[in-house]
Image: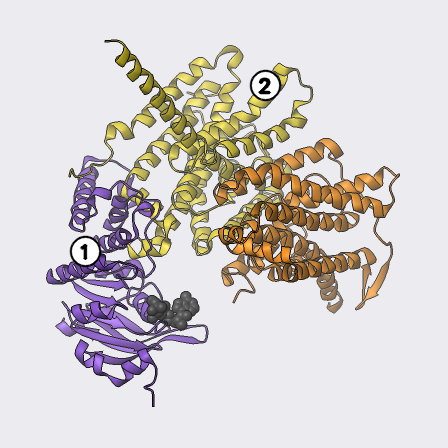
Amino acid sequence: MSAQEFLVVDRLSRDFGGQRAVAEVSFTLPEGALTALIGPNGAGKTTLFNLVAGALPPTSGAVRFRGQPVLEAAQATRLGVARTFQNIRLFPGLSVLENVLAAMGGHSFWQGSFRLPRRLEEERLRLKRAHYLLEDLGLAHLGEQPARTIPFGQQRLLEIARALALQPRLLLLDEPAAGLNRTETAALAELIRRLHGRGLSLLLVEHDMHLVMHLASRVIVLEQGRIIADGTPAEVQCDERVRTAYLGPPAE
Amino acid sequence: MNVPQPIPNRRLFRGPALLLVAILAFPLAARGDYAYLLPLGQLCAIYGIIVTGLTLLMGFTGQISLGHAGFYGFGAYVGAVAATAGRLPVAAALGVAVAAGALLALAAGFAVLRLHGHHLALATLCLGVILGEFINKAQITGGAGGMFDLPEITLGGLVKGSAAGKFYLVWAVAWLVVLWAVQLTASPVGRALKAIQGDEGAAAAAGIPVFWIKLKVFVISGALAALAGTLYAFVYTPSYLGPEEFSLMFSVTLVTMAVIGGMGNVWGGLAGAAVMTSLHELITLGGEKLGIVQVARWEQLIFGLLLALILIFCPEGLMPALGGWAQRARAWWGRRWKMRTRLEP
Amino acid sequence: MQNIAMLLLVKGVMIGSIYALISLGFNVIYRTTGVLNFAQGEFVMVGGLSAAWASGTGRVPLAGAIGIGLGTAAAVGWLVDALAIRPLRQASASVQIIATVGVSICLRALAAIFWGTDPCHLPPLQPGSVQLAGVAVEIQNLWMLGAGAVGMAALAVGFRWTATGRAMRACAENPEAARLCGVNPGRMSALAFTLSALLGGLGGILLTPVLSMSYDRGTMLGLKGFAAAILGGLGHPVAGVAGGLILGVLEQCSAWYSSLYKETLALALVVILLLLRPKGLLAR
Ligand SMILES: Nc1ncnc2c1ncn2[C@@H]1O[C@H](COP(=O)(O)OP(=O)(O)OP(=O)(O)O)[C@@H](O)[C@H]1O
Ligand SMILES: [Mg+2]
């Protein structure tokens, strides 16, 4: 497997009724990259995320991750792709800790049927991992609380914690800074940089241009389901089509 | 900060241990004038088995089924036919019936578990009515006339004909089912089920194979209902098996048991089954004591009213309500205790 | 052959119009309160039985009996809301649904106590039959269709163009916001239950002369109305009406194929339709 084959998106399209939300999108990501995906509202960023994470079947085209085809959401997580949602989707009835634990596997009915010492040991290990993960993100003190009762900013973090519990190689973050205040955004940027520093590859959808330009080494711009620009932040910022897409056609 | 620990075995198995004691003691108390309580207790166990499956399916996984009386009847009749026309020994017939129930649930679940919410409710409702109609009209089930004189499970003559023996037999099965369900729901599987109930898309994103897990739970609940059916046929009333028990309304009653008891854990379902089963008896008994004539005519009405009252006063179900009262009582005692200790020295 | 097809179609549409009325009742309550009312079929039974009882006493003319039937049904609908739904406004949906199950048990028991368990009859609004596309159709059936259509039309107009109708729809969309705009969800819920019981009662009165009525008929009728509403797509009253007509025809066809298993066949077809169009037949 060459470095180029980490994530391959190959002429991917997705229709909703008559509308083409993602149209013939192709790109590849190398391992270890921190890439941003931007575009105006309705450009198809979330749809593209859903396709990459296997949550939606494509109309045509394919996604491959480390040489394996992405077919379905749970299978994608086994390949090493984890994601967060644009509108936070936690498990409201579970506690903060359980939200993280839910992503740590152990779903065998057979093994769950007998509470053997071995199983308890595994569960202890899971609890320990979940606890340290929460501690790492500064959520450990909330462990017992129902997920729906904690503040918005921490729900965002918890969603990231749940994704990290899958021990992914590629993390897809859909507008992680939306709705956060300035300190929270700064802390988030710090966290993203820290995760990237540990060797995690990230693909980031974000409207906060400041954050994007700051963090990402590469920016892909989507408009009406197509890639209209792809390059370093500086290149993309100067691109005429990107300016048009965001600000409308230049005034005469 | 301390690393959290799993629920200790002592706490987890306290419930099943208490249940075991209650099961062992019940026939000792239900003697003489109260012997009629034994068949009632058997029925509680049989319904408890079904409702435990339903609690897993509805309370944990969030998938409604309004057709479980169908699986229940299916199990009873497959077992009965296998034992009579099929000439199988009872134990084998029981195995065949449970396997058939699981297979039917597998096929049905594979089709209908793609549906959600009200659509799933309708599909399972249709399934239950279809099964009920088969039972009511097919040749092999004896139709509305039912089947007579089925072989009985005797465990080598151990429980032959004795109400207490039958009681122990059905409750042994029910206890094992409960013991298993308690462990399963305390394992990561229980968490996965609640995650699916919370948000199927997010559960998939957390690596949970949503459809397969839903299917497994559906199959388990179908098999449990079929198992309960065989117990009903071979233990509870081997002399006569009729279609009345497996009507559409009984599917609804089963769901009602689950909801009334509280669907958050296994115990709620069991409590709901016990309450709903004994309501009938309580009403009749109360009517006799109060000297009301023709209680039977009023029974359904009182039954419906009690149902509404329970819901109005304990909308979360009886078990959570009881838990809440117990907590309040303990808090009240605690305050009294503190006051006394403060006054005494 | 063609004649049989025509016959099945006509009879199916006639029965289907009753299912359509019941499904409409389901939708009225569901859209206003979010409750799935399992006592819907009992409204039909109450309407039919009370009218039959009034007419059976021999002292009330048919029109009066119909009035009594409609009035009783509406009153029962209002009472159900006041006694069972209002105290449970804050409870979860499944609890509210089970509460309506409790209500349906009560209503059935009350009906058995008041009117006994024997089937009751009601004379047709107008005896006789007419030829329609080569098929003899009883005039009562036409009444069913006509009254059903009028009821639906009135409802559609009311929902769309009256302030109350708009308020009810607002309640369904967002009860909290509706309350802030001065809509009283409690009143709307009472109205929805009364209205939907009225629709059900109408269905019962129309159905009784054709099929007779007894205390336990409501359950199956309610199930059919439920199936119709879901087939069309819950929350879409017009689609629910279409669902009712489709169900009626499906049922007649399966009855013709196998009278013994007509229920089985019709409901199996419903499941298949559901699986083919998991969001409702007419949903986009
Ligand atoms: N489930 C769906 N059904 C129908 N249309 C959809 C669906 N999901 C997305 N779309 C349509 O596809 C297009 C792309 O939507 P998408 O959510 O991917 O955009 P986005 O780039 O994430 O926008 P935003 O910045 O607002 O999040 C939009 O026009 C949207 O209306
Ligand atoms: Mg988006």
C-alpha separation, residue under disc 1 versus residue under disc 2 = 61 Å
Q: Colour of chain C?
A: orange
Q: Residue at x 42, y 27 (%)?
A: B322
Residue situated in front as seen by the camera: A226 or B251: A226
What's the residue at 26%, 85% (across, down)? A240
Identify which residue, C257 or A180, lies in the foreground.
A180
Q: Residues within 10 Å of mark 2 (few under 14, many from 20)?
A: few
Horizontally, residue C35 falls left or right of residue C149, namely left
Relative to A38, is C149 above or below? above
The chain carrying label 2 is B
Q: Position of residue A205 (x, y in %)?
A: 26, 67
Colour in which the image shows chain B:
yellow
- Asked if marks 1 and 2 touch (Cβ < 8 Å), the reply is no
Image location (x, y in percent) of residue B104 = 46, 48
Pointer 1 residue: A167
Splitting the image into four quadrants, where does ligand 2 fall?
A: bottom left
Say what amino acid the circle numbered 1 marks: Gln
Q: Nearer the viewer, residue C269 or B311?
A: B311
Q: Kindly state the secondary structure of the residue where label 2 is placed.
A: helix
Question: Quick one: which residue is furthest to the bottom in this view?
Answer: A252
Give the drawing colour for chain A: purple
Looking at the image, which residue is at 34% across and 90% down? A252
Which amino acid is tagged 2?
A: Leu
Give the x, y percent position of residue C174.
50, 54
Query: Residue B285: which numbered mark, if any?
Result: 2
- Residue C260 rendering spot, x and y as whole percentages: 66, 49
- Asked which quadrant contains residue A217, the reply is bottom left
